Image (cartoon, rainbow, N blue to C red):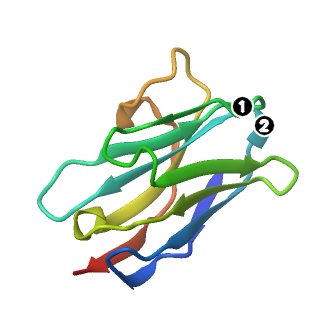
Amino acid sequence: QAQLVESGGGSVQAGGSLRLSCAASGLTFSSYVMAWFRQAPGKEREFVARISWSRGFTYYADSVKGRFTISRDNAKTTAYLQMNSLKPEDTAVYYCAATNQVPVTTTPRNYDYWGQGTQVTVSS
């Protein structure tokens, strides 16, 4: 049974940094596109970033481009999200997700597996 477990969330002041991790088990990690989504209170879940199976092609939401970096370590079956220059509007629960569906999209319903989420709070 596939399982994704996020860690690394917390509280930080604006301009600070956090690194989220997503440890995967029960799936052939290198065959899955890994992505991060986030959901703020009262808002829909939104796409943040994704990284391809093995070549590491990345794609970001405009709101985080240049500030966030997604990466993966297939040997450790772990994906990461390095978040720099954090803003109060980045406050949300961050979710790790995995898919092997094609075409790859930014739509949550196209992702097969999800973590439980980790809270990120950015204060001004």
Q: Is residue 67 toward the left or the right of residue 39 in the image?
A: right
How many C-alpha atoms fall within 10 Å of the one at disc 2: few (<14), some, or many (≥20)?
some
Residue 28 visible from this viewpoint = no
User: In the picture, which quadrant includes the C terminus?
Assistant: bottom left
Q: Earlier in the sequence, mark 2 or mark 1?
A: 2
Residue 88 visible from this viewpoint = yes
User: Residue lying farthest left?
Assistant: 42
Question: In the image, what residue occupies the spot 42% across and 44% down?
Answer: 65
User: Residue lying farthest top?
Assistant: 103
- Looking at numbered disc 1 in the image, what kind of residue is underneath it? Trp
List the residue tagged with mark 2. 30
Q: Residue 59: where, in percent of width, then height?
A: 50, 33
Tell me the SS state at disc 1: loop
Q: Residue 26: where, in percent of width, then height?
A: 74, 50
Q: Is residue 110 toward the left or the right of residue 88 in the image?
A: right
How far, Cα to Cα, is label 2 from label 1? 5 Å
Q: Residue 114: where, in percent of width, then height?
A: 50, 51
Q: In the image, which disc is placed on residue 87?
A: none
Question: Where 111 falls versus 97 (above or below)?
Answer: above
Depth check: give the residue in front, 115 or 121: 121
Q: Is residue 110 toward the left or the right of residue 2 in the image?
A: left
Question: Where 7 falls versus 21 (above or below)?
Answer: below
Whether tag 2 and tag 1 are in contact, CB under 8 A, the answer is yes
Q: Is residue 86 toward the left or the right of residue 123 in the image?
A: right
- Residue 10 falls in which quadrant of the image? bottom left
Depth check: give the residue in front, 83 or 72: 83
List the residue tagged with mark 1. 53
Question: In the image, what residue occupies the spot 81% across and 46% down?
Answer: 74
- Looking at numbered disc 2 in the image, what kind of residue is underneath it? Ser
User: Residue lying farthest right?
Assistant: 75
Question: Where 69 falls versus 13 (above or below)?
Answer: above
